[in-house]
Amino acid sequence: MAAARSSFLNLLVTLTIVTLVASLSLGYVYEWTKEPIARAQMAKQLKAIESVVSGYDNNPVLESYRLPTPNGKDSLDFFPAKKKGELIGVAVKTKSSKAYNGDIWLMVGFNVKGEIQNIFVIEHKETPGLGSKMTTPKFLQQFMGRNLTTMKLTVKKEGGDVDAITGATISTRAFSGAVQTAYETFINSASHGAVN
Amino acid sequence: MEQSISLKDNFLKGVIKENPVFVLLLGCCPTLGVTSSAVNGLGMGAATAFVLVMSNLAIALVKNVIPDKVRIPAFIVIIAAFVTVVQLLMAAYTPALNEQLGLFIPLIVVNCIVLGRAEAFASRNTAVASMIDGLGMGVGFTFALLLLGTIRELLGSLSVFGYKLVDADGILIFVLAPGAFITLGFIIATMKWLKNRENIKSH
């Protein structure tokens, strides 16, 4: 190999040039992909919102706002769905850190009466075949159209109303907790006049 | 000596004779980690193949101006740059796959196949030969991950490329980590058996 000499200056110059060229090209690619990445993220949020509230004609992402949870420890993103300027529902992005593996992110859709329209699982890292069943209609169905004043969000063996996923009680509990947080924040905001 | 082998043989050795996963047993971390479905295996394989081809090419082009003492850091910077490019491109154009593969994309940087080919091949061969070597290794890696992913998805979720064949639960363990080890073991054993049988025949 006709490699260059390993003098100190030579090493210094080589490494500097290599890193400089690498970072310059990365900066270029970053600029180039910035727009598409932002668009992909917007599309992902809109897809989640679309599946939990329906019939709106505004862009909920552009009108989103953030509200603190009642216990003040966290804050959640609210996406208002409006038709002809009138509020018809709200999608709330909520999460739980008490899952079996990593965080669970959910989008919960409420109508103006405070009933759950639908729930969309944005992200989870639960065990495939066990906790991952939270994305199936069979599990999600039990929440649809329910008003949480009449549904207790704990699993059945703890006296609640949630049918746990077999073998994934922890995931179910985390999922229910996230929905509960979304609901409490939503009701709290409604009583303070943020949603009317 | 390396110059004497044809481009075709150079390409094919990565796919079969020196398949990175089944024969060299390199890159087991993504191999076992992401192959819970065929799509994941294919995506991971394609991303790694891109990095292999590009970094082999770049390293073969600059090998003569890099002093020996700093060649590893220089190679790693080049590889890391290409991995970041892949990650940005995937986030922009295949966001769903990017989320599925998650941490395993940045981990291509430390995949032993990539640095291994840079050291063993690209740093002492021409640019074209290095690209072909990277392509062969990349295709071999992709083939291995796709095979593993397809078998695990078929047995574990009873589906092929996300298309459900039977509406029932599969054998859960094949989707989980132990299933990866079991499947890889059986594939390697099968390949050894085929190879041995060939050797006996030719004697």
Image (cartoon, helix red, strand yellow):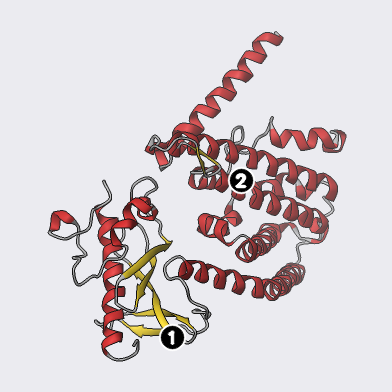
User: Closer to the camera, A94 or B61?
Assistant: A94
Does residue A118 lie above or below A59 as drawn?
Answer: above
User: Closer to the camera, B194 or A16?
Assistant: B194
Q: Mark 2 lies on which chain?
A: B
Helix or strand or loop: what does disc 1 sit on?
strand
Does residue A88 lie above or below B193 as drawn?
Answer: below
Residue that appears at 39% across and 66% down: A105
Q: Where is residue A74 in the image (x, y as percent from the top left)?
A: 32, 79
* Label 1: few (<14), some (14–19) or many (≥20) C-alpha neighbours in 10 Å: few
Judge from the rendering whether residue A128 lies leftward or rightward of residue A180; answer left or right.
right
- The reply to whether residue B71 is visible in this rendering is yes
Residue that appears at 30% across and 65% down: A145
**How many numbered circles does the render carry?**
2
Real-space Cα separation, disc 1 to disc 2, in angstroms: 46 Å
Which residue sits furthest left?
A159
Residue A86's label in the rendered image is 1
The amino acid at mark 2 is Leu
Q: Position of residue B176 (x, y in %)?
A: 40, 42
* Label 2: few (<14), some (14–19) or many (≥20) C-alpha neighbours in 10 Å: many
Residue B42, quarter of the rendered image? top right
Judge from the rendering whether residue B191 lies leftward or rightward of residue B54; answer left or right.
left
- The reply to whether residue A104 is visible in this rendering is no
For disc 2, the marked residue is B42
| Rendered-image quadrant of the N terminus of chain B | top right
Helix or strand or loop: what does disc 2 sit on?
helix
User: Closer to the camera, A73 or B64?
Assistant: A73
Q: Nearer the viewer, mark 1 or mark 2?
A: 1
Residue that appears at 34% across and 57% down: A140
Q: Position of residue A196 (x, y in %)?
A: 34, 88
Judge from the rendering whether residue B74 lies leftward or rightward of residue A82; answer left or right.
right
Residue A20, quarter of the rendered image? bottom right
Q: Which chain carries label 1?
A: A
